[in-house]
Image: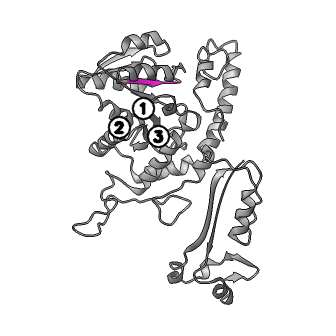
Amino acid sequence: MTSSLSLHSSFVPSFADLSDRGLISKNSPTSVSISKVPTWEKKQISNRNSFKLNCVMEKSVDGQTHSTVNNTTDSLNTMNIKEEASVSTLLVNLDNKFDPFDAMSTPLYQTATFKQPSAIENGPYDYTRSGNPTRDALESLLAKLDKADRAFCFTSGMAALSAVTHLIKNGEEIVAGDDVYGGSDRLLSQVVPRSGVVVKRVNTTKLDEVAAAIGPQTKLVWLESPTNPRQQISDIRKISEMAHAQGALVLVDNSIMSPVLSRPLELGADIVMHSATKFIAGHSDVMAGVLAVKGEKLAKEVYFLQNSEGSGLAPFDCWLCLRGIKTMALRIEKQQENARKIAMYLSSHPRVKKVYYAGLPDHPGHHLHFSQVLKSIN
C-alpha cells in the first residue's frame, strides 16, 4: 500500500485566539477555516511543528486526522515503514524544493526572464533558456526516478539524443545498434557523419560483435534494450564493462521501458535517454526528451549543451509532463497487462507469423530482459 501523509499545525495566531473568533472548533483544534483568516494574517501563520511522511507503508492507515501531531507521530511509530519511497509514491508526492509554498500541483513559471535583486546582484534565475523553476522541478524528479546525479529536459527525445552526439568530436567513434528507433537511425546514418564522427553499426545482442567494434577511438556506445521495433535485448552490464574498459560512455535509450520499469544507470550506463513524449507525459499532448546522467562532470557538459543550443524544454511543456507523470506507474501497469494479453493472443493466432515481444517466455532475450528490469511497480 502506498500512502502520503502531510500534517501541519499552525500556531500563529494562537488556537485560543482562533477559537474565540470562531475560526476553529475547540474540540478539534486542527480544523482551521483558513478562508476566514484575513490575507495579512495568513502570511503570519507558520508551521511551529510539522510532520511529513513520504514512504511505503506495510499496514493500512486510518486517514482520520489526529487531534495533535504528537498523537499522529506515536501511531505511525508502531508501523513497519520502509526508508525509501516507492516509485509510485515519488510520482504523486513530489518534494518540490523550488516552490516555497508546497503547492500539490507544481506552479507554472511561464516567463522568459526574471527580475534581479539589483543591478549588481544575481537571483537564482535570470533567463528561462538557462533555468526555470518548473523545469528544475521536473528534472529533479526525473533524476530521483533514474537514480541519476542530474537529469535534463529537452524539446524532444531526438533533441536529447542530438545533444549526446555533440559530446563526440571529429574523428572519434560511436558504436550503435543496428536495430534502433527510426529517428535515431536517421540521426546516426545521415546527420552525425557530417561532423566527421565515425558511426559503427553492430548487432548489440552479440557480445563478440560489440567487443570487436569497440576500440581506442570509441567514445560512445549507443544501446536500446528492448530495441524499437524488434524488441531485441542487449546485455547492458557486460557491454558497459567493455565500453568503460576503453574509456567510452554508454548511452541507453530507455523510452520503451521508462524509469518505472528499468534503471540502466544501475546496470552500468552513463546516460539514459527517455522520450518523455510517450510514457512519462502520457497524454500525447507534449513533445519532450530527458537525459539522466551519472557524474557531475558529465552533467556539466550536458547542461552546457542544453543551455548553449537552446534545447531546454519550455515551462508549459514541463508543467504538462509534471501533470502526466503522476499517473505514470498506474498507466504503465495497465499498459503492460494489455500488451501481454495482446502478445499472447497474437502468438497463438494461425495467421500471425511472428510476435516481437520480450515478455513472451519463448523470446530469445526473455531471461536477460527480466534480469535487467525492476521487479515490480510499487
- Category of crowding for the residue at label 1, using alpha-carbon neighbours closer than 10 angstroms: few (below 14), some (14–19), many (at least 20): many
Span colored in magenta: 221-225
Left or right, 45 with reference to 222: right
Q: Is residue 256 above or below residue 24?
A: above
Name the residue rendered at 51%, 50% in the picture.
322
Q: Is residue 70 above or below residue 245?
A: below
Please report whichever mark, 2 or 3, sits nearer to the chain's N-terminal start. 3
The answer to which quarter of the image holds residue 61 is bottom right
Amino acid at circle 1: Asp
Left or right, 170 with reference to 282: left
The residue that label 3 is drawn on is 148
Tell me if residue 180 can be seen. no
> Which of the two residues, 64 or 39, is positioned nearer the viewer here?
64
Question: What residue occupies the far bottom of the structure in this picture?
Answer: 20
Name the residue rendered at 51%, 28% in the picture.
267
The residue that label 1 is drawn on is 270
Is disc 1 in contact with disc 3, using a CB cutoff of under 8 Å?
Answer: no
